[in-house]
Amino acid sequence: MGTLAVLHASQLVTLAGPKRARVGTEMSKLAIIPNGGMLIRDGKIDIVGASDEIEKKAGDVEIVDAGGRVVLPGFVDAHAHPVFAGNRLDDFERRARGETYGQIAAAGGGIWSTVEKTRAASHVDLLAQATRHARWFLGCGTTTVEAKSGYGLTVEDELKILSVIRRLNQETPLEIVPTFLGAHAVPREMRADKYVNCVIQEMLPQVVSERLAEFCDVFCECGYFDVEQSREILSVAKKLGLKLRIHADQLTNSGGAKLAAELKATTADHLEKTDVQGIAAMKSAGVQPVLLPGSVYALGWAGYPRAREMIESGLGVVIATDFNPGSSPTPSMPMILSLACTQMKMSPAEVITASTINAAYSLSRGDKIGSLEIGKLANFSIFDCEDYREIAYRFGFPQTHSVYVRGAKVADGLASSV
């Protein structure tokens, strides 16, 4: 790795500030440097400041001229399911015809259809499809992604998915945080209580012994895993040294947010149906909410999470894509920013914070990524616009110009050729 100077950003959006997730009015403070620049050495940020000052100190180094464009920390996507086989086009068409989530699942669609395809796919085939997904994430300006298992639902297949996630982390520039989600659904061939025992007694010990995951997640929901089952799985995972995340209160207000607070989970995700008591419980326990407006949009629903109440209560809100083949088939964080502004009434500044520094802290990486500060990894994206607000404002087409991970260019956005 050499030395690199990034110069002439119309706005260098640094997000410099407290060394923790930002809350309340802090989420609107982006610490922007007009005509900003950075000096990068050995993949890390060495100096941040005005371009004129950076240029004086740079010497004879490689120059990246941002050309009056916006420079942002690489997006951190803190909830995604990038390893699976096939697609769910049939589900998509059925939803367009008016069928419900439950009707589609009963007809053989939903999570189960992806499980069948993923079980049948080889490690090589899964890696090939996931590598394509990694390119999509990078092309949208995302440099770090949380990746969940959950489409195997047997010991062998869950381990297969997690091993693909490990290979993806090794073989692509995308930086990946692995999460074990064996409790995504109850397999058809097994009773729920027997499957819970399988997750606890067989899957979790192997996942931990092979160091295949940092987090454990559970789909805590009526018809999937109830609060008692979720508590049992997550408590064992915590004892084994995994950090906790929970799919909570997506379809019903089933107590997932309160369970996240009880167990002091790092995050509670979805939260479409979470009420004021759930919000208060998360606040008291320091749980970060991860909001996924893409899944509400893609399912054609109207009930978005109560983002404003969460921000006003002092929670370190995160937004993420929930990239998956069924309910949110988008890797585009800029689209999620737009939905968060228009549907959850977050401000353009708040959504930038929620998708960078707050997301980084939710993955226990806030000391390394999520902002453009001295000593952090030089993970950043250049967008083909002059004002960061344009990223959420101009939805539905790519504005990514180029993407860098550890100071190396890893992707050209489509906007670079427009």
Image (tube, helix red, strand yellow):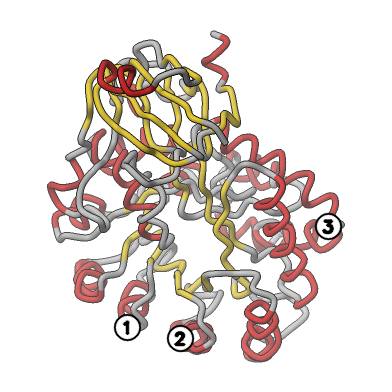
In the displayed image of the protein, which residue is found farthest to the front? Answer: 59
Label 3, label 2: how many angstroms apart (C-alpha)? 31 Å
Q: Classify 10 Å Cα crowding around label 1: few (below 14), some (14-19), many (20 and above).
A: some
Using the image, determine if residue 180 lies above or below residue 48. below
Which numbered dot is residue 123? Answer: 3
Query: Is residue 333 visible to the viewer in this orientation of the structure?
Result: yes
Pointer 3 and pointer 1: residues touching (CB < 8 Å)?
A: no
Question: Circles 3 and 2: CB distance less than 8 Å?
Answer: no
Using residue 133 as the reference point, say whether residue 123 is left or right of it: right
Q: Hey, which quadrant is residue 13 in on the image?
A: top left
Q: Which residue is mark 2?
A: 231
Local SS, label 1 = helix
> Which label sits on residue 14?
none
Q: How many marks?
A: 3
- Left or right for 208, reference 301: right
Inter-mark Cα distance, 3 to 1: 37 Å
Q: Residues within 10 Å of mark 2 (few under 14, many from 20)?
A: some
Q: Nearer the viewer, residue 181 or 366?
A: 366
Q: Could you tell me residue 123's position as x and y percent?
A: 83, 57
Q: Nearer the viewer, residue 162 or 61?
A: 61
Residues at marks 1 and 2, CA–CA distance in whole angstroms: 9 Å
Q: Residue at x 75, y 76 (%)?
A: 154
Circle nearer the N terminus (1, 2):
2
Q: Which residue is mark 1?
A: 262
Identify which residue, 156 or 379, lies in the foreground.
Answer: 379
Q: Amino acid at mark 2?
A: Arg
Considering the image in quadrants, where does the C terminus appear?
top right
Residue 158, horizontal then vertical, whole percent? 72, 70
Which residue: 25% across, 56% down? 19
Q: Position of residue 98 (x, y in %)?
A: 56, 44
